[in-house]
Amino acid sequence: MTDWIERAREVAAKLAVDAVERDRRGETPYQKVQLLKDTGLVTLLGPAEHGGGGQSWETAYRVIREVAKADGSIGQLLGYHYLWAWAARLVATDAQVAAVEELYTTGNLFFGGAVNPRDSDLTITEDGDDIVYNGHKSFSTGGKVSDLTVLEGVLAGTEDHIFAIVPSQQEGITFHDDWDNIGQRLTESGSVTISDVRVPWASAAGYVDRKFRPLVYNTLNVPAIQLVFTNFYLGIAQGALETALAYTRDRTRPWPYGGDDKQAASEEWYILDGYGDLQAKLWAVEALVDKAGAAISRVLHAPREELTPEARGEVAVLIAAAKQRAVDTGLEIGTKIFELTGARASASKYGLDRFWRNLRTHSLHDPLPYKRREVGEYALLGAYPTPTWYT
C-alpha cells in the first residue's frame, strides 16, 4: 500500500501546482486524466496478469483521498472510475468479469457512468441478439474524459435492470457540456443523451440466457461508492486544513489589539485552539474512514457467493457513519479556516474557498439525515439498511 500512496502523493503534488487556476477555468481535464493513466493509478485495481496493480480497495480508497487533497474533482473522477471498473465484478458473470478487466487494464482505459437513479431509467429494447439503450441522464460523471461508459436501464415490458459497458466515443452518446456548478467543476458531470446504443445480449452484465442470477454481493455497489464519496470528502478536508496551516505559517499576521499581543500568528492562543480542534476532529474521521475501508475491502475481495445480508448490513452502517462525520467535519473546516487564516486569505488568488465549494456541492448527492437515520436504526433497533440505489 505504501508505494501506491506515495505515488498518489506525487500525483497530488503535480495537481496542486495549478489547482486554483484550473478550478477557475473549468476546462475539461484531459491532461490530468492522462496523468492518472501515466502513473498507473487508473489500473491500480486491475489484475496483475494484465499489467494492473492487483491492489485492494483499501489501497484504492487511500489513493482517492491523497489525490483529492490537491484537487477534489480529480479525486472524484478517479474514485468513480474505480467503482465502475469494479462494476463487472459486482454484477457480471465470471467470463464477463475476465473480459472487462483484461480490456480496461491492458488498454489503460478510464471509466465514466451514466447511472443516475433520480432520473427515469434508460429504456432498453430487444433487437435479435442485441439490446438497444435510449434515454437521457442529468449526470454522467467522467463524460468526455472517459474511454468507457457504464449504462443502466430497464428492459421494456419488464422490471429487469441491465448494466452494460460501452465505448464512450460513439455516435449514440452525446455529452452536453452543461456541468456548471459552484464546486467539483472539473468532473465532467453534465448530462448525456443515449440514442440507439447497441449491446450484444452476451454483454448484458450478469445475464445468462437472458436471465439475471442475483447475489447479495450485487448490492455492494452503493456502499462501495458511498465510501468513495467519503474518501474524497475527507481528502478535500485534509487539503483544506493543510493549505490553511501553510498559509498561517507564512502569511497570517498576529492581532495587535487583544491586550495579549504576540509576535507571530503561530503564537496566538485562539489560532492554536482553532487548529487544534480541527486537527483532532479530522484525525477522528480518518480513523473511522480507514476502519470502514478495511471492512468493505474484506468483503469486496472475498468470494462473491459468501456475502450474507448481515455482513453487508454491518459494512453499510459503518460507511453511513463515516460519511456523515466526513461531511460535517469537512464543512466545518472549509468555513473555519477563514477565521484562522485572516481577512487577506479570502483573496481569490489563494483559492481557499474551493475546498468548501467542492465538498458542499457533492455532499448534496443524497440527504445526510438519512445516513444518520440508518446509524440510529442500527444503534437503537439493531436494524440494517435496506439495499436501495442510495443505501
Image (tube, rainbow, N blue to C red):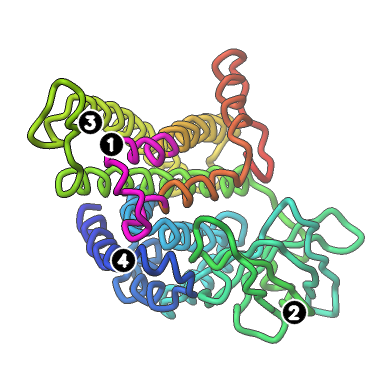
Give the residue type at disc 1.
Leu
Measured from the top left, where is residue 215 in percent x and y? 64, 46
- Residue pushed farthest bottom? 171
Query: Which residue corresponds to mark 1?
Result: 340
Q: Residue at x 37, y 68 (%)?
A: 21
In the image: residue 389, left or right of residue 121: left
Query: Which residue corresponds to mark 2?
Result: 198
Give the residue type at disc 4.
Leu
Please, what secondary structure does the residue beneath circle 3 have? helix
- Check the image and report above or below for 199 versus 331: below
Q: Earlier in the sequence, mark 2 or mark 4?
A: 4
Q: CA distance from mark 1 to mark 4?
A: 25 Å
Mark carried by residue 15: 4
Q: Which residues are magenta?
A: 331-353
Tell me, yes or no, whether the highlighted magenta stretch contains residue 352. yes
Q: Residue at x 54, y 61 (%)?
A: 84
Mark carried by residue 271: 3
Q: Earlier in the sequence, mark 2 or mark 1?
A: 2
